[in-house]
Amino acid sequence: MSRMLPLGVGAAVAAVGLSGLSGVSLGSTGGHAAALPPVDGVPQATCFWFGPMGIDDPVTNLAYPEENVLYWGARFRMPAGSTMRFEGRYPHARYMSLNSYGVVEGVEHAAVDALEDTAIRPDRGSVNPYDIGADRYAPRRSYTVRMTEGQASRARNVLDAPTTNAGAVQELIYRVYLPDAPRDRRPRSLPRPVLRLADGTELRGSGLCDAINDPQRYFSFRTMPPAVYTGLVNTPGADPATNPSYSPVRWERFFNQPLALSVYRLLTPSADRRLADLALGDIGGYYDNRNVRYSVGPINAAYGKVLVLRGKLPRTPRTGPEVRRMQGGQMRYWSICENGSPVETDGIDCVSDADLRPLLEKDRRYTVVVSRRIDRPDNALRRCGVAWLNWGDRDDITGRQTGTLLLRNLDADPSFPRSLQKVGVDDVDVLSRFNTPEKKILGPYQPVGRYTSTSGFEDRGCPGAQAPGRG
């Protein structure tokens, strides 16, 4: 089953292999003209960028997208001796970044480098609105980023893109989290590529697109084949009714795909010691965002039709049209998303820090209820201080009501000790990994998920939300 990969998490139990990348010609429309017609249903922003992609588009709702993020991608080959730069304007948003992708330690489509907004120096006379205290609506907000090819550089405003892909194919993803206004969702908001050929000629728009050797291509990957998924669910010794979920919910920090897939196996000191060879390190894969660390919690309604998540919310900056100055926080963005199985990899629903902030209790604790619409408790309402996360109405291919919770910690402050960024590979014992280190390190910031019934949750009543705007 080959599908387009629009974004960058792919996370823990995404896919077992990648298909070849199939080409799509996008014509020669200039880089900032009106959006082009879709190709095979994939939105085309310009002749260089495709997208935006995300959870609301059934064609691009793959690879566990985040509901509050816009994703644009580009895939191209640079002519020999050429260089590329991007001329952009910082969007009005919570966060933006450029990630380049290649092969890292044998893992395809891993992030080679990432440039987040605060790491990009503005052009002379402009302001970086993501610096703490900066004017988020400063009118002069331009920047320039250079992209290397076949070399690594630690210089400012340089995105490293070593030629680790076969045939020197370059792949980029541009992300914008929580854009403030419609203008930040349009093709005109995208960074403009400028190609400088070996003879010094500079190309833009359609001329650039004609010169990138291949027609622009979109990302493609093979989701987990149904037979593989069924085989993993039916691992000998495991309960096929619930594998790989547990009650209470068990979270697993995502480091790399081979280690992530081992959640389907029985892990004891006498079983499958080969897992020690799978700890490749924190190299990610499947177009992950290197400013994010992820944790995955498989869930299963065999334990209960209603799942209640409780935890403490980190402090994050407020953004939006009404917020003029950029704020700091313990991390830039936090969310929990519910997704389909690794066969579908579709995103279903997300709850972000902005959603929870008005509902927080005095100690910044939150309550999130996950259920299908038909099982939603009457008191799973915002006015009762509860955020509701849609489980989704589709069973997996084995006929089970399952789900894949994905916790995101974006750009955590290094001084904050309770983030997924602090959970390292050395903290994980691959022979007894279900004694996960997340709970010890995250402490109260680790979501605790317990199952109940619709009536069981309704018995708690409706204590009412805290005063809006707390936190």
Image: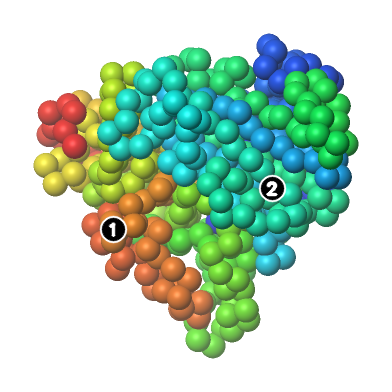
Relative placement, left or right, of 93 versus 269 is left
Q: Residue at x 39, y 58 (%)?
A: 420
Q: Residue 236: x, y in percent?
A: 61, 73
| Display coloring | rainbow
Q: Amino acid at mark 2?
A: Thr
* Circle 2 crowding by C-alpha within 10 Å: few under 14, some 14–19, many from 20: some
Q: Mark 2 falls on what kind of element?
A: loop
Please tell me which of labels 2 and 1 falls first in the chain: 2
| Viewer-nearest residue: 211 or 295 | 211
Q: Mark 1 falls on what kind of element?
A: loop
Relative placement, left or right, of 317 versus 21 is left
Picture layout, residue 227 above or below residue 45: below
One can see residue 362 in this view: yes
Location of mark 1 (residue): 415
Picture layout, residue 398 above or below residue 338: below
Q: Which mark is residue 148?
A: 2
Q: Residue at x 44, y 35 (%)?
A: 95
Relative placement, left or right, of 87 versus 458 is right
Q: Please count the marks in the image.
A: 2
Q: Residue 449: x, y in percent?
A: 33, 53
Q: Amino acid at mark 1?
A: Ser
| Viewer-nearest residue: 284 or 411 | 411
Residue, far bottom: 270
* Circle 1 crowding by C-alpha within 10 Å: few under 14, some 14–19, many from 20: few
Quarter residue 138 falls in: top left
Q: Residue 310: x, y in percent?
A: 26, 49
Residue, far top: 34
